[in-house]
Image (tube, rainbow, N blue to C red):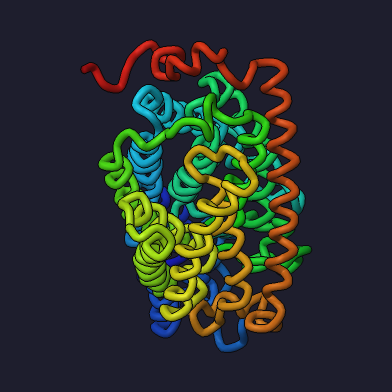
Amino acid sequence: MKAATLAVILSGTLTLGAPVSAYSQQAAAAPSPTLEQRVAGLEAYIANTDPERGLKGANGAVPTGLTMDTVGTPGPGHNGWMMTAAALVLFMTLPGLALSYGGLVRRKNVLSVLAQCFGIAGMVTILWWAVGYSLVFAPGKPWLGDLRYAMLHNVGGAPNTHYCFWVSQSVYAMFELMFAIITPAIIIGATAERMRFAAVLSFVALWMFLVYFPITHMVWGSDGAMNGANNGKALIKAVDFAGGLVVHMASGWSSLIICMLLGRRLNYGREKMPPHSMVLCMVGTAMMWVGWYGFNAGSALGSDMIAANAFLTTTLSAAVGSSAWAFAEFIDTRHSSVLGFCSGAIGGLVIIAPACGYVSASSAILLGLLGGIVPYFAVVKLKAMLGYDDALDAFGVHAIGGTLGVLLTGILARTEINPRLAVHLSGIVGRTLWIEQLKAIFVTIAIAVIGTFVAGIIVKVFVGLRPSQDLESMGLDLTDHGEEGYIL
């Protein structure tokens, strides 16, 4: 909140969440707010909206002494929900994605997947602290932020009011970190069982700078070139509520490029490579579904009605997606597998991510149906037709589902579901927003493809992407980590 805010509104004396020495003199000097202003300020907190509106008098001006530039006040309810949401998003990767992917590989490679998820979590956290958060969420250029928040400088308890009025910037930075962790971790689904641990970490480090940081700033940065929801000067007025462009398209299209650079696994197509534990896969997938509530509902950046809508639409799309995939599989093969239910749930969650805070329950049902059926045919038919070895179907589920979700968001989004769309996009929501979405899709694919190719070639030349054939046959658990997942 901007100013000697809610506490000044409510008490006229002290700003909550701030040192007394910082605000007490200003609060004491400030004119006493009216009852109307106090109620308006409390309503702004409950509705998770700009508190300064509640301070304005009849003439539209903010009373002298009631504002303090960009200093905000964290609210305990919104802060508490966002800390919970951040933990849920981390839960999606560790242990959710790790167990889901780990169950899908062969027994000799299960630990390699777990290690890669842990390694990515640690390295991305360091990058995020050093420069990542700043490059993404500091103002700068339309395609990248500056370094004012490097090493999380001045990222403390006060909110960053470019993004949220009632959540501490430290909490917001950690919430967004969890997105930065899971996005490259998705890519290892395409490279599983044949990419060296050192190569994975080297590739991800380069990929974050070449792909993730630029795309995320462009879509979610306050002055980002594709942040149509919050930047009135955006060059492309696209919307992405919870990561269709940023997470699923960026990782999914990158997955296709890096798996093609790697080449197929040894004996791919000549011998069966079934999952070694569908039990682990199912448990991990269920954890991801639970964690996805933080991913989607948390992207409202507060515990408000938009978060509630995202919670609703996420549930519907995931459930329908799971059933739709299993039904398509039954029609095609006469059986519905546990892998099909798991894949469909993820497909439903992926396709709803960019739309969950913008669309109705009925639209979520439609999205879930498409999220189960379209990725099914991409995984089963398209992959066989083109012959690429996307080991765990990161491209088929995340790229195809994410791209479709981003496009359909432009068609299905409504201002009556999310009034904030009317701030900058009232003239195009329900009309031509889908064109802006299409522009953002092309830009995201271009950045992901080019950035991944460059990062992959650099790692291939200087580090090496794959182990020798003998080591790959032995399994990455022993060759990279010197241990086995199961001792029989």
Q: Position of residue 214 (x, y in %)?
A: 69, 45
Determine the residue positioned at 45% across, 12% down.
479
Q: Is residue 105 above or below residue 24?
A: above
Query: Which residue is at 36% across, 53% downward?
Result: 342
Q: Quadrant of residue 74?
A: bottom left
**Residue 148: where, in percent of width, then height?**
65, 40
Q: Which quadrant of the view contains residue 251?
A: top right
The C terminus sits in image quarter? top left
Residue at the extreme bottom: 58
Residue 304 visible to an observer of this rendering:
no
Q: Is residue 282 left or right of residue 194?
A: left
Residue with the most extreme left position: 488
The image shows residue 251, relative to residue 111, as above or below, that is: below
Residue at 49%, 80% in the rendered image = 417
71, above or below 12, in the image = above
At horizontal 59% and vertical 71% (from top left) the residue drawn is 408
Q: Is residue 444 visible?
A: yes
Please tell me which residue lies in front, 159 or 52. 159
Q: Is residue 435 left or right of residue 292?
A: right
Provide residue 447's location: percent of width, then percent of height: 73, 46
Residue nearest the viewer, comparing 11 with 179: 179
17 or 287, which lies in front? Answer: 287
Q: How many marks?
A: 0
Above or below for 243 versus 11: above
x, y (%) of residue 456?
68, 29
Where, by quadrant of the figure, is residue 145 drawn?
Answer: top right
